[in-house]
Structures are given as C-alpha cells and as structure tokens.
C-alpha cells in the first residue's frame, strides 16, 4: 500500500530524514514513533505531497508520488497534528467542499457525513462556522473529512491529541475497521500505550534514521514499548 | 498593578517601532528611529499640513471679528471627528478582544485596572488623531491673535478636553459595536455597507467643503448669533480655546460627567462582554440532501466564500467592485454635465475625454487586487490545498477566476453606463472595451504572480497579508503607476498626436503580451513555486 524507498529530505544543511525505507501492507496499522524533531512529520508530509523530497521514492498503491501525485492523493487522506481548517466555512460547507474535490456522490456524502457526525456528536454544530469550533471539534471534523471518500491509506500526525476519551475510542475502532476492509493506516504518536495496543507494526525514528521497525513483538521482545523506546533513545 | 499593566499596554502599542514581525527580531536603533520619524512626518507633515492650511484660511477672518470661539468650535469638532474616526474601528477589539484577556483575568488583577489600561490605548489613539487637527489650529491662532497666557492655557485645556471626549465617545461606540456584534448575523456584509457609507459621507463632505467654508466665512456673524442662541454648548466648547473661564468650567464638568458615566458602563459590563463567546444564537444543523459540484466549481466557490466572509478582504482588495457600479450610476445621473465640462477643458486634444473615461475605469479596476493576497490568505490551512487531489494550477486558476468574474460583472455595469451616456464612434468604443478587459486580465494575473512570489503564510491577523504584504503593495502601486502612465503619456508626452485609437491600441498590445507572459509563468513556474510553499 505504501512503500518508502531511500527517502532523504534536507532543510539546508540539516538532514531531517536520512535514507528511510518503509513498507506498509494493506490491512496494517503502522505506528511511527520518535522524539520531537526526529523526522516523523517530515516523513508524513513527504508522503502526502506537502514536502518535496531530495532523494528516494514513495509509492502509494504502486504509483509514484512524484510521477502521479493526483492519483496518489486521491487514494489517501491526511490529518495533520494541528487541524487548521477553513475558518470562514461552516462545518458542513467544509465537508461538502472536500466531498466535491474527491467526487463523492451526493447520496454517499450525505450518508457518510451524517453517520460520522452523529458518531462524533457534532451534527448539531455542522452549521456553525469552523472559527467557533474548539480544537477537539476541529479534529473531529478533520477525521470525518478524511473518512469521507473511503481512502485506501490514511496518514495521521498525532491524531489523538485534543480528542475526548469517547472520540479517541471511536477513532481507534474506525482505524481498525478501515484496515479490516483492506486499507492501511500510517500514524505518528507519542502515546506509546496507544501504539502498543493499536498497531500491527511500528517504526522508531531517531535523528532522521529508522532505527527499528517490525511487528510489535519483533520491536519490543519481552520488554514494554516504552522501555525499548527509552533504551534506543539513550 | 496599574503601572505594570500600563507599561505592558504601551509596549503593545509601540511594539511595531521596536520589533520587526516579518523578520521576527528586534529592530536596530537606527531602524526604530527612522520608523518613528517616518510616522511623525506622515502625521505632522501630511495630516498636520492639511489642517494647518485649513486653520490659516479660517482663523484670520474669525479672529478679526472677535469670533475665536467659533474657530475653535469648528476645528475642535473636526478634531473630535477625526479622533473618533481614527480610533473607533480599533476600540472594540482593543477594549474587549485582546488575546491576553484570559491570562489577565485569571490573575489577581482588579477588573478596573485592566479596563483602565485598555482605555489608555484608546486614549493614545484618539489623542494622536485629534492632535493633528487641534495643535496646528492652536498654533495658527496664537500666531494670528497673539501669544498670551489665556490663549496658551485655553489651547492646552481644549486639547485635554477633546482627547478625553474622543476617548469617551470611542468607548461608547465600541460598547455599542460589542453589543451589536454579539447578536448580528451577517456581520461581513453589514460592515462593508457601513464602511462604504462612511467613505461616501467622507467624499460628500470633502467635495462640499470648499463651498461650505465659503458660505461660512461670508455669513460669519449670522451663524455666530444662531449658534449662541440655539447651541450654547458649542459656543462654550469653542470659548474654551480662547481661555473663557466660565465656559472652561462648564465644559470640564460636562466632559467629566460623561467620562464617569462611560467608565461606570464599561467597567460594569467589561467582564460580561470580554468573556462572551461572540456566538450568535446557535444555528442548528438540519440534515438535508447535499449537492455534488465539480472540482472547478468547488474551488471557485471556496474563493468566493473566503472573500465574502471577510470585510477586510472585501474593502481593501475589492473596493473597485463596489465603487464601479456607484460611479456608473453617478455617470448616468451627472454624466452629460461632466462631459460638457471635460470637453471644455480638454476638447482641444482629440480623444482626451475618452481617455479620461478610460483612465477612470482603469483606476477603479486598479483597486481590485483580490489575487494579490489570496496565496498568503491560505495561511496555515495551505496543507489542505496541497494534500487534495487537485493540481496547483486548479487552485491558482480558481483565485484568478474569482477576480475575473467579479471584475467582469462590475466592469460590464460600468461599460453599459458609459455606452449610454457617451457619444462615441463605434471603433473607439470597441478599443475602450478591449483596453478595459485586457487591463482586468493583466491586474488579475499580475496580482496572482506577486502573490506567488511574495507569499506571507505566517500571519496571526488576516489583515496583515491583506494590507501590509509586499505582494499587495506592489500590485496596488503597480496599478496606480499604470494609470498614471496612461494619463501622462497622452497629456504630457504627446500621445494625443497618435489619436485615441492608436494610443490605446499600444496599451492593449502591451496588456495582452504582459498578461499572457504572466499567465504562462503562472501555469508553469508559478505552479511549481506554489507546490513548494
């Protein structure tokens, strides 16, 4: 589903991501762990087409992000760490806009918007301008917009920040469901307990380099993920 | 406590002199001094200069008739008007919407101290604007009527009275705005309409000022007696300036009472207004059928939504769209008279009147620079456009289309009115249409070009990219420069010897070549730059 080969991204002299290789299969929830500034967000932004990278290749469903950016983008959805949405739109107008861009039919968008808005309990607020939303509500709206076109791959940067416990639980269920249906999830997190419980595979990045990756058992062995992470960070 | 808050407030007010937000670092001492000097030159040199000239015109005849009070009443009213006009738009946000409201209210600080420190900002703003009127007026009066203790103290007390009154008035208006904005639904359009009315009123008085002053100076004694009889307070207000003790005491007491009333009102309601969510009664969403639109339409509608939701964006980047139909109606109403006048003035040079109309249309189009800040306005939500399955060109094209559509509509209204009123030859009219349309195109692509090469994405206040960004400045002055060249080329360098058709033909060719060059750049390199932002 997602293949990252020899990805290198530099900011001036600083190498943010250094020769990173990663392969995510359909059905996998893949956690991406690392300290602040390790290169997680740079990697995620390179995958979704926000950042142009210096070397390497990224393939989504077999298509190159460099060669076929639109085809790749139509298969994915991205939720950034801080969901800055269009404050001048109402929630429903924003969702409608996203649905238009992804060519979601009128019937499908109605069904999905109402289903997810009900689940996240923001249906009543959809007519409000986004500027009036709290951080958590914006995060919920960003999640709904990501799920609207039923993407094959969802990229998320710290998706649980700002969500209440019920919404977090719901998101975890939705993540599992999309993977059960053949999709894949690639997300960064600092909450190691979440990664431990939720992820099929995990990758640890440090100073732009991938220092460990594999299934949860392969990565942590007999220890907890937290112990492994702290050992690797030393 | 109050001292600390006042210090913080002063830091905020004058922060711009010491800190360069664009470079995110402190200004050098030289830069700070230059910046302050520049502001002082603008305020005293330009605004102060205008009011010095006005004072000189009014002072001598009034002082000669011993009607100094009327001179001060008039200049004082002007000072109040300018002071209030200059500060009232910032009063609401300055008083109630400060970002540190939560922080300050969570600390052991009396609400009255917060209110007092906020009032200080309003006071300084009002003082700054009213002083550029009343200080020149005071100096001119002393030069004309002589320097004595009475005139010196009269002027000083009048300035204090005016500045306190301006602050009081601004705060009361700010309070009214706060109350109304908590309940208003279509804030953006109402703000635009009110602003346009203000601009209209300003120009009405501006054009009428000369005849009003002449009328006043001719009938000084009559008006003076009427004011004394029917508007004693105005008489007393003016008399403060000439050092009348009784009038001074009355006005001091009156302003003090009004100030105390305002203080009571603001300090009592501050907490409630400042901590209100600002939400209009919540509009509850009702599930309904949703329509599907094409990508192109969705992107254009997004641009329209952004434009119409922001009064600052509409007024600063699209003023010409609103003024064009107004001017067109004025043209229908007074057009024939205007043409007769212009023909009498410039009729000797063939095609001059047509050129002046073309310049008027191009001048109005130059005020429409929506594409210039449009890239910067993506701000922190740029990631959405970058991650959606749309090409950079589709995003840029939508921005271009919005300006072309809005300009097209307003220009069409303008051209129809011009066609109705002007006695053209058909060939000349066609050339005018081609010039106007090609200029609309050039302005739109030039603005977008500037937006792409000079984006500012890290703003915290939307007005920063709209009013202060390099892309907007260059596009705006570029448009004005173009209009000036159009005029100077014909009138000064004898473009009129070529005749209207040939002269405008050259500009059309330049417009088309420049426009297409920029358009091709936007489709290629512009898209690459946008993708890399």
Image (cartoon, coloured by chain):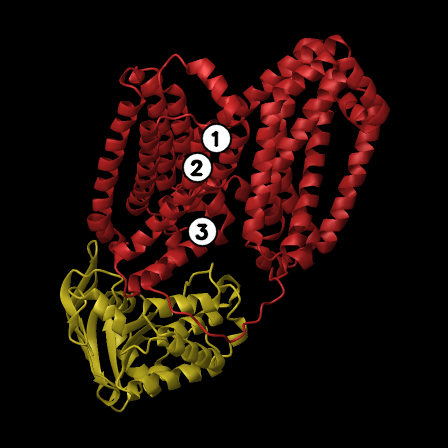
Chain colours: A yellow, B red
Q: Which residue is mark 1?
A: B36
* Element class at badge 2: helix
* Element class at badge 1: helix
Give x and y (percent) for residue B416: 43, 37
Residue plotted at (22% across, 36% down): B513
* Element class at badge 3: helix
Asked whether A18 or B46 is in front, the reply is B46
Q: Earlier in the sequence, mark 1 or mark 3?
A: 1
Residue B333: image quadrant is: top right
Give x and y (percent) for residue B93: 58, 49
Q: Earlier in the sequence, mark 2 or mark 3?
A: 3
Q: Chain of mark 3?
A: B
Q: Which residue is mark 2?
A: B416
Residue plotted at (56% across, 40% down): B196
Give x and y (percent) for residue A173: 39, 86
Q: Chain of mark 2?
A: B
Asked whether B288 or B64 is in front, the reply is B288
Q: Is residue B362 left or right of residue B182?
A: left
Cα distance between the residues tagged 2 and 3: 26 Å
Vertical order, B41 against A17 (above or below): above
**CB under 8 Å between callouts 2 and 1?**
no
Vertical order, B141 against B424 (above or below): above
Q: Is residue A143 left or right of residue B133?
A: left
Q: Residues within 10 Å of mark 2 (few under 14, many from 20)?
A: few
Q: Which residue is mark 3?
A: B307
């Amino acid at each position: 589903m997602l293949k990252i080969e020899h990805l290198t991204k530099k900011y001036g002299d600083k190498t943010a991501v250094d020769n990173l290789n990663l392969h995510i299969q359909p059905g996998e929830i893949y956690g991406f762990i690392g300290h602040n500034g390790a290169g997680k967000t740079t990697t995620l932004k390179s995958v979704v087409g926000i950042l142009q990278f210096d070397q390497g290749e990224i393939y989504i469903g077999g298509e190159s992000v460099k060669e076929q950016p639109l085809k790749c983008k139509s298969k994915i959805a991205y939720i950034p760490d801080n969901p800055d949405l269009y404050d001048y739109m109402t929630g429903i107008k924003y969702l409608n806009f996203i649905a238009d861009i992804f060519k979601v039919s009128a019937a499908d968008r109605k069904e999905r918007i109402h289903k997810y808005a009900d689940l996240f309990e923001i249906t009543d607020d959809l007519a409000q301008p986004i500027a009036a939303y709290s951080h958590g509500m914006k995060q919920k709206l960003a999640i709904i917009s990501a799920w609207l076109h039923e993407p094959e791959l969802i990229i998320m940067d710290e998706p649980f920040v700002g969500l209440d416990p019920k919404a977090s639980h719901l998101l975890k269920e939705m993540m599992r469901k999309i993977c059960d249906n053949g999709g894949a999830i690639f997300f960064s997190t600092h909450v190691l307990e979440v990664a431990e419980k939720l992820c099929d595979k995990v990758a640890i990045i440090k100073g732009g380099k991938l220092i460990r990756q594999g299934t949860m058992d392969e990565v942590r062995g007999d220890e907890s993920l937290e112990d492994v992470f702290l050992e690797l960070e030393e | 406590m109050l001292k600390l808050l006042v210090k913080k407030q002063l830091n905020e007010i004058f922060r711009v002199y010491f800190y360069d937000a664009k470079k995110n670092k402190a200004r050098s001492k030289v830069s700070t001094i230059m910046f302050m000097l520049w502001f002082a030159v603008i305020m005293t040199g330009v605004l102060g200069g205008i009011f010095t000239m006005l004072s000189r015109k009014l002072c001598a005849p009034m002082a000669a008739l011993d009607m100094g009070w009327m001179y001060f009443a008039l200049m004082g009213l002007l000072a109040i008007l300018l002071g209030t006009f200059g500060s009232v738009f910032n009063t609401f946000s300055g008083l109630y919407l400060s970002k540190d409201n939560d922080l300050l209210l969570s600390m052991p600080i009396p609400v009255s101290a917060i209110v007092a420190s906020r009032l200080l900002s309003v006071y300084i703003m009002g003082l700054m604007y009213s002083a550029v009127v009343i200080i020149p007026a005071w100096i001119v009066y002393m030069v004309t009527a002589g320097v004595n203790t009475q005139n010196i103290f009269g002027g000083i007390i009048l300035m204090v009275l005016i500045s306190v009154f301006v602050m009081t008035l601004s705060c009361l208006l700010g309070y009214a705005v706060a109350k109304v904005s908590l309940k208003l639904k279509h804030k953006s359009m109402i703000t635009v309409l009110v602003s346009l009315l203000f601009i209209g009123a300003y120009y009405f008085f501006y054009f009428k000022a000369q005849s009003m002053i002449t009328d006043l100076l001719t009938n000084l004694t009559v008006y003076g007696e009427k004011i004394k009889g029917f508007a004693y307070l105005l008489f007393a207000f003016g008399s403060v300036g000439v050092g009348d003790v009784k009038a001074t005491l009355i006005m001091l007491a009156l302003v003090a009472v009004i100030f105390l009333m305002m203080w009571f009102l603001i300090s009592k309601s501050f907490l409630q207004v400042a901590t209100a969510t600002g939400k209009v009664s919540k509009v509850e969403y009702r599930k309904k059928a949703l329509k599907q639109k094409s990508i192109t339409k969705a992107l254009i509608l997004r641009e329209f939504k952004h434009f119409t939701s922001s009064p600052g964006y509409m007024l600063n980047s699209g003023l010409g769209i609103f003024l064009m139909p107004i001017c067109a109606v004025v043209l229908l109403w007074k057009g024939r008279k205007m043409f007769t006048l212009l023909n009498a003035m410039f009729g000797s040079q063939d095609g001059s009147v047509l050129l002046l109309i073309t310049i008027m249309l191009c001048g109005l189009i130059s005020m429409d620079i929506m594409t210039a800040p449009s890239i910067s306005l993506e701000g922190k939500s740029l990631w959405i456009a970058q991650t959606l399955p749309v090409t950079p060109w589709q995003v840029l094209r939508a921005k271009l289309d919005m300006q072309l559509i809005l300009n097209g509509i307003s220009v069409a209204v303008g051209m129809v009115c011009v066609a109705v009123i002007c006695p053209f030859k058909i060939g000349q009219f066609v050339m005018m249409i081609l010039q106007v349309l090609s200029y609309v195109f050039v302005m739109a692509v030039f603005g977008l070009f500037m937006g792409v090469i000079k984006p500012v994405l890290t703003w915290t206040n939307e007005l920063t990219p709209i009013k202060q960004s390099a892309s907007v400045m260059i596009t705006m002055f570029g448009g004005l420069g173009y209009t000036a060249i159009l005029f100077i080329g014909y009138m000064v360098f004898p473009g009129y010897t070529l005749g209207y058709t040939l002269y405008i033909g050259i500009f059309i060719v330049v417009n088309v070549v420049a426009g297409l060059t920029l358009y091709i750049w936007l489709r290629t390199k512009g898209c690459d730059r946008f993708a890399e932002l």
